[in-house]
Amino acid sequence: MSRQLLVPVDGSPLSKRALEYAFDTHSDATVVALHVIDPSEPGYSSMTPVDVRNEPPHGSEAWFERAAEEEELVFEEVRELADEHDADLTTESVTGDAAREIIDYVEDHDIDGIVLGGHGRLGPSRLLLGSVAEMVVARSPVTVTVVRDTPEE
């Protein structure tokens, strides 16, 4: 039976690196690209710069429509990467707090591991991950691989 890996995706370069890492390192696995729509974050994962003053009101129909459009752009890029790597890919979407939804998805599905991005830092903060990555690492019932961003010198 093929392994299933969960890769949270948000359109950021770091989530793209995590996805590429999963494809390159686990070519025999089925990758589930999970996108979390988080209405508590104004520009939660937008691929384009967001001026929160121009965002539709949180929770409004217009806000969710914009989020769905952004999500489709994320999934288009994810599918293109999967095609380039000849990878087995499934896309999934959930709404809620990102860390909680990632863990819930793992617990509710047959997921063998998680690959996600974590920001690399210098100095005393070098041990810190982003808040979502930190929560996932701390609470995951499966192995988590953190793909680090290269810190700027």
Image: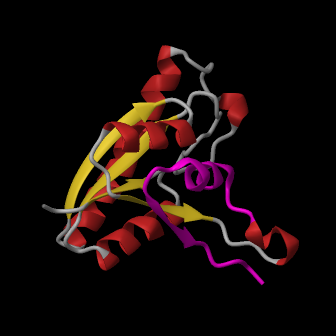
Q: What residue sits 33% from the left and 49% below the top? A: 75
Q: What residue sits 60% from the left and 23% below the top? A: 56
Q: Which of the pair 53/116 is nearer the observer?
A: 116
View extreme (right): residue: 124
* Quadrant occupied by the N terminus: bottom left
Q: What residue sits 40% from the left and 33% below the top? A: 94
Q: Quarter of the image holding residue 88?
A: bottom left
Based on the picture, tell me whether residue 136 belongs to the magenta stretch: yes
Q: Which of the pair 129/16 is nearer the observer?
A: 129
Q: Which of the pair 108/23 is nearer the observer?
A: 108
View extreme (front): residue: 141
Q: Quarter of the image holding residue 122?
A: bottom right
The answer to whether residue 151 is left or right of residue 93 is: right
Q: Which of the pair 125/139 is nearer the observer?
A: 139
View extreme (top): residue: 60
View extreme (bottom): residue: 153
* Region rendered in magenta: 128-153
Q: What residue sits 39% from the left and 74% below the top? A: 21
- The image shows residue 141, relative to residue 150, as above or below, that is above
Q: Position of residue 90 (x, y in %)?
A: 23, 50
Q: Position of residue 131 (x, y in %)?
A: 68, 50
Based on the picture, tell me whether residue 82 belongs to the magenta stretch: no
Q: How many marks?
A: 0
The answer to whether residue 123 is left or right of residue 130 is: right
Q: Position of residue 133 (x, y in %)?
A: 60, 55
* Quadrant occupied by the C terminus: bottom right
Q: Position of residue 28 (x, y in %)?
A: 19, 71
